[in-house]
Image (cartoon, rainbow, N blue to C red):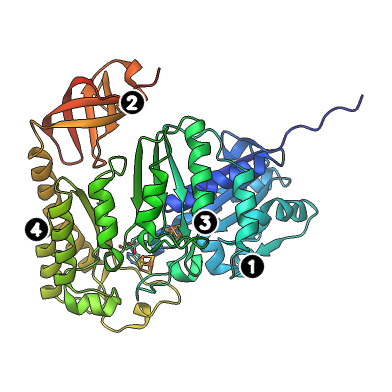
Amino acid sequence: MAEQARQQKVHITTFGCQMNEYDSSRLASLLASHGFVPAEDAESADLVLLNTCSVRERAEHKVYSYLGALRELKQRRPGLLIGVGGCVAQQEGKRLLDSVPYLDLVFGTQALERVPELIEEARAGRRVVCTPGEPMPVGLAGAHEADHPQLRPGLKAMVTVMTGCDNFCSYCVVPYVRGRERSRPASEVAREVAQLTAAGAREVTLLGQNVNSYRDPERGLDFAGLLEMLCREPELWRLRFTTSHPKDLSPALVEAMAGLDKVMEQLHLPAQSGSDRVLAAMKRGYTRRQYLERVADLRRRAPGVCLGGDIIVGFPGETEDDFAQSLSLLEEVGYDFLFSFMYSDRPFTKASKLPDKHLEAEKSRRLQRLQELQRGISLARHRALVGSVAEVLVEGPAKRGQGLMSGRERGGRVVNFEGKAELKGTLARVRVKEGLVNSLKGRLVGPAGGVEP
Ligand code: SAH
Ligand code: SF4
Ligand code: F3S
C-alpha cells in the first residue's frame, strides 16, 4: 500500500486590523478544505503566509522585517513556500516579488479565493502574483463563505459585513488597497452568524471600514435594519460593530443602539482631529460642531454608551492651535477609549503630497501629550462607574492578576473579578469596585441569565 502523503502544514501570521484577522480565519478554513493543517510556528510549516497591513509606514516595515527573518529558514529548507497577502501585497503587487527574491506568492485583498490555485502554481516552481483590483462577483464570494465556515470560533467571533471604502480621507491608503465599498447580502451575513452561534459563539462583532454605510445589495436593508435582523438569532447574546464614520451615524442606528437589547452600548466613532481646518484638509466630511452634536444626540438616547475615537497628530500643516483643539475635543467628548497615531505618509494619498510636514520628534511630542491627557480622562470615566453593576460576558482567567476571572461589560470595558472557572461562557453581574486606566475591578453579584446548561 502506498504510504499516504504527509499532511501539509500552514502557518498564517496576521498584521493589522480585525478585517485582516477575519480574512485570515477564512483563509485558514479554505486551506483546511484543501488538506492543510495548522502549523504551530513558521519553523514547522510547509507554507508560511503573511496577511499584511499598510495603514502606516511602521506597519509596512514590520512586514519587511518579518520577511527578513524568514530568509534564513528558506535557505535551510528550499521546499518551504512563502506568501504575502493583504494590504501591502495589494499595494506593492509584483514589486514585492522583485524586492524579496525568496518570496513565492503574492495575493491581494480581493484574491483570497484564488490562494489554493496560487499555491499549486508556486509548488510547480512558478513565482506568482494575483492582485485583482475588482472584487469577485458577489455570488461566487458568497458560495465560498458559506462553504467554508470559520474554524473553531470562540465565545466571541467577527463577521465582515462590508469591505472597502469610498471615503478617500486624504491621509488614508485603505480605499486604494481594499477597493470600493461593497456590502455582503444580509441573508449571507445571517447564515454566517447562525453557523457561528451553532458552533458556540455568543458575541459577534460586525466589521467594516465604514460599517454604518452598510446597504444590503439584495433587499436594500440599511445597517440598523441588519442589526435588527441579526438580533432575531436566538443563540446570539451580544452584537457589536466597528468602525462607524461620524458622517453616516444615522438616527436609525442611534435608535437601534438605544432600543435593541442585544446591541451593546459601544461606539467607535473616530474624529481624527478637533480642528475644522484640519478636518477639511483630511476630507472627513464633518465639522467639529457636527461631530459634537452627533455625540450629544447619541448620549441623550443611549446614556451609558461607551465611546471611543481615533486621533491623528501631526497632520501636514497642523498648527499648535489645531493640535490644542484636538486636546480640547478629548475633554469635551470624554472618550472612554482612544487610539491615537502620528501622521504617516502613505502611497497614493493626497496628504502625502502636501507641504509643511512635521518632524518625527514633534509628532511624538504631540502624541505623548495627547495620550497623557486621555489616560486621565479614561481613569476618571472608569472611576465614575464604581458602585454600578455591570453585565459581564465571562471569557476566562484574567491575563494578569492571580485567580481573577475576566470578561467585558456591555460597553466593551474589561472587568476583572474573583470568581470560579466554571463561570466562563456565562453572563455574570459584577459590582464595580475600582476603576483603572484600562480596566475595571469588581465583585461578583450573581448570574445575569443566559447561562448555558
Ligand atoms: N475606517 C476607519 C479607520 C481605518 S484605519 C475609519 O475611518 O474610522 C484606522 C485608523 O488609522 C484611522 O482611524 C486613523 O486614525 C489611522 N490612520 C489611517 N491612515 C493614517 C495615516 N496615514 N497616518 C496615521 N494614522 C492613520
Ligand atoms: Fe480610511 Fe477614511 Fe475610509 Fe476610514 S473612512 S478607511 S480613514 S478613507
Ligand atoms: Fe491595515 Fe489593511 Fe486593515 S491597511 S488597518 S490591514 S484594511
Q: Which residue is mark 3?
A: 185
Secondary element under disc 4, as helix, strand or loop, is helix
Location of the C terminus by quadrant is top left
First in sequence: mark 4 or mark 1? 1
Three-letter amino acid code at disc 2? Gly
2 and 4 marks in contact (CB < 8 Å): no
Q: Quadrant of residue 450?
A: top left
Residue shown at 11%/50% (left/top)?
Answer: 377
Dot in front, 3 or 1: 3
Dot in front, 2 or 4: 2
Q: How many marks?
A: 4
Answer few, some or many: residues within 10 Å of disc 3's Cα (few below 14, many 20 plus, some between 14 and 19). Answer: many
Secondary element under disc 2, as helix, strand or loop, is loop
First in sequence: mark 3 or mark 1? 1
Q: Which residue is mark 1?
A: 98
Q: Is residue 389 left or right of residue 20?
A: left
Residues under labels 3 and 2: Cα distance? 29 Å
Three-letter amino acid code at disc 4? Glu
Q: Is residue 442 above or below residue 320?
A: above
Give the label on residue 132, or none: none
